[in-house]
Amino acid sequence: MAYQTSGTIQSWAEEDRPREKLMLKGKAALSEAELIAILINSGTVDLTAVDVAKIILKSVNNNLNDLAKLSIKDLSKFRGIGEAKAISVIAALELGRRRKEQDRPQRAKVTCSRDAYNEMIPHLIDKPHEEFWILLMNRANEILRPVQISTGGISGTVADPKLIFKQAIEHLASSLILFHNHPSGNLMPSQADKDLTKKLRDAGRLLDIPVLDHLIFTDKSYFSFADEGIL
């Protein structure tokens, strides 16, 4: 839609107002002028906030890097922009600069069963009872988060498939690894462990969230279903 060069934003269709458009369609749907219009909030008698934002952007050839170089005094020269609005624009651009400056934290990556075991040591070491956990990962096998599913007694705990895959779906995981500990130190899987692993593996295939491994954890070592070829 072509914006009017006069009139208030309130007179536009709701989906064309910057704030409402952001709520309805998301931030990516807004132009730079619309985003700046949200910052300056209001225009003049004959210009909307979007019109004012377009004029400001045109003065810097629509280059946000050049816009960020303008001072409070520079911005205040535009009709409809006072000191408070100029400060809002400058503060927003500075936040953007600082965000760009910061490196995204590096996520740990699982390349083998030992990586997975090491990740879970802080959560499962020295536990006197059994617990069931999952390690959620993205498509690059980077760890999204560990999630405790259940805690039980000395010889067993419950692993509900519905709860496991609910967690995986809610956190947008692409794959997962199963964990449970054996406080006794026995590394060998029971028949119940094998049956549960098969059940969860099949469920993961249906949901396109593959189960990559199931580790039996002890304080000194681990057993990997994938390494042993029984996943």
Image: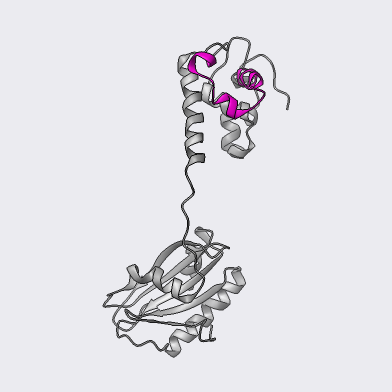
Q: Nearer the viewer, residue 166 or 219?
A: 219
Colour mapping used in the image:
one colour
Q: Identify the image quadrant of residue 193.
A: bottom left
Against 120, is 63 above or below? above
Q: Nearer the viewer, residue 34 or 159?
A: 34
Q: Quadrant of the C terminus?
A: bottom right
Residue 201 visible in the picture: yes
Disc tally is 0
Residue 17 visible in the picture: no
Rendering coords of residue 4 (x, y %) = 70, 18
- Magenta segment's dominant SS is helix
Q: Identify the image quadrant of residue 31.
A: top right
Against 231, is 77 above or below? above
Q: Identify the image quadrant of residue 69.
A: top right
Is 27 included in the stretch rendered in magenta?
no
Residue drawn 64% across and 21% down? 54
Against 23, is 140 above or below? below
Rendering coords of residue 14 (x, y %) = 62, 29
Q: Nearer the viewer, residue 92 or 128?
A: 92
Residue drawn 34% across and 82% down? 182
Against 114, is 72 above or below? above
Q: Nearer the viewer, residue 118 or 153?
A: 118
Horizontal relation, residue 173 to residue 220: left or right: right
Residue drawn 51% across and 86% down? 228
Is 55 included in the stretch rendered in magenta?
yes
Q: Quadrant of the N terminus?
A: top right
Rendering coords of residue 220 (x, y %) = 33, 81
Residue drawn 50% across and 35% down? 97
- In the rendered structure, which segment of residues is drawn in magenta? 52-75
Rendering coords of residue 143 (x, y %) = 48, 63
